[in-house]
Image: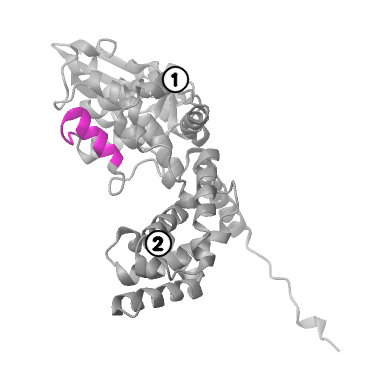
Amino acid sequence: MANNNRAVNATLDQAFLQRVDQIKALVNGVLEHEILVGDAAYIKHENKLAVPFTPELQYKYTLVHSGSVSSAAYLTVARMGLLAYWRDELNSADNEEIFKADIFAKSYTALKANGVTTVTSDKDPAFKDVAFATPKSFPDSDWSLDLNDLDNLAPINGVNLKILFLHMKDIGMLVSSNLVKTGHHYQKTTNGAFKAIERKRYGDAVFSEELRGIIYHEAMHCFTQIAKMSIYARFMANYKANSLQGSFLLLDTVVTKRLPVVLAGAAWLSAGITVMNELLAIPNIGTRIPVDYSTLVGDARAALTECINVGKSSAVDLSRFEALAAFAFGVLTEIAPSHSAAKALSLSKMATQHLGAATAGNDLGRKALRGEI
């Protein structure tokens, strides 16, 4: 008979419960932010968005919180350009990445004397979210940039701000499509399209990595995920209807030739189809590819196109093409290990999940190299 006297309640310390509840609240806040903007990272405090957006207050807020004239000017003009071309889509932002313009306008005192403006932050608790180290002094010319007259504003760090304003027309589209393609706003190590449009527009890669981060990441990050991705969604709707108009007609060819994009969840299929088509074109390999794979390429291409058109990798069932991609990867890693697709993590993952198909591909590739077929 069981000895019930051995069981005791595993009680939890109340201080511990209170602590984990506090941590859960913080973590849930990060989770909500991640869902809203697309990742768990927050933009820097000085790069928050002025709401409602006023260029002058955006510039001054960033300036007094970071002390960099170039970062304040670039961020402000970048957002001016984004909202000029994409304001219908960029209509909501995360509360964690904004500051209220009217409150900030009352939160400081600016005194001018001898060509210098000294700015002091108000100590009123109501303005604690926009407080900054005080006092701060700036040449009058830095404190009062005329952002309504970009034509006559002197270039900053050699970059004409009017051209930067135009530049953001293409950056808004690139960020939106990149979110669909990779799930990221901008990554300096992989997003060649951003540098390509930069080189075309300016003749060279003119921005430092710090400023590139402000222009290509921080400027747009504050807007909600739905808002940012709706740029691409509207492009696709117009693209399918053959009725591109408005800002879409103004996009540079560096951008348009990359549209539409392959979605992150279907990248493995796109790479697999490309590899399979190349293999089918090699006589002594193509004729020995199993019929189950060779006849499936057309269906795979149709399924990929449907996903791209709908803008969702879940639009159709792609699972039946996984073995095809794994087989193609297996052949490729044997006959052309230096091929870019042979290093594709998405294809490698499929090969791991479908080891039999990948091994069959390896075997065919090795036979081809040995001249046995």
Q: Residue at x 33, y 24 (%)?
A: 61
Residue 280 is labelled as: 2
Q: Position of residue 257 (x, y in %)?
A: 34, 36
Of label 2 and label 1, which has the lower sequence position?
Answer: 1
Separation of disc 2 and disc 1 at Cα?
40 Å
Q: Is residue 22 above or below residue 16?
A: above
What amino acid does circle 1 point to?
Gln
Q: Quick one: SS at disc 1?
A: loop
Residue 335 x, y percent position in the rendering: 31, 70
Figure quadrant of the N terminus: bottom right
- Return the mark for residue 261: none
The answer to if 200 sits in the magenta stretch is yes
Q: Quadrant of residue 77?
A: top left
Secondary element under disc 2, as helix, strand or loop, is helix
Q: Nearer the viewer, residue 172 or 332?
A: 332
Q: Amino acid at mark 2?
A: Leu
Boundaries of the magenta span: 193-206
**Count of numbered labels shown in the rendering:** 2
Is residue 334 depicted above or below 306 in this figure?
below
Apparent side of residue 202 relative to residue 309 in the rendered image (left or right):
left
Q: Quadrant of the C terminus?
A: bottom left
Question: Residue at image x 30%, y 48%?
Answer: 190
Closer to the camera in the image, 205 or 129: 205
* Viewer-side label of 2, 1: 2
| Residue 87 placement, left or right of 335 | right
Which residue corresponds to mark 1?
245
Q: Nearer the viewer, residue 324 or 104?
A: 324
Label 2 Cα crowd, 10 Å radius (few <14 / some 14-19 / many 20+): some
- Residue 55: percent from left, percent from top: 34, 17
Whole-percent x, y for residue 275 in the image: 38, 59
Residue 130 quadrant: top left
Q: Is residue 83 visible?
A: no
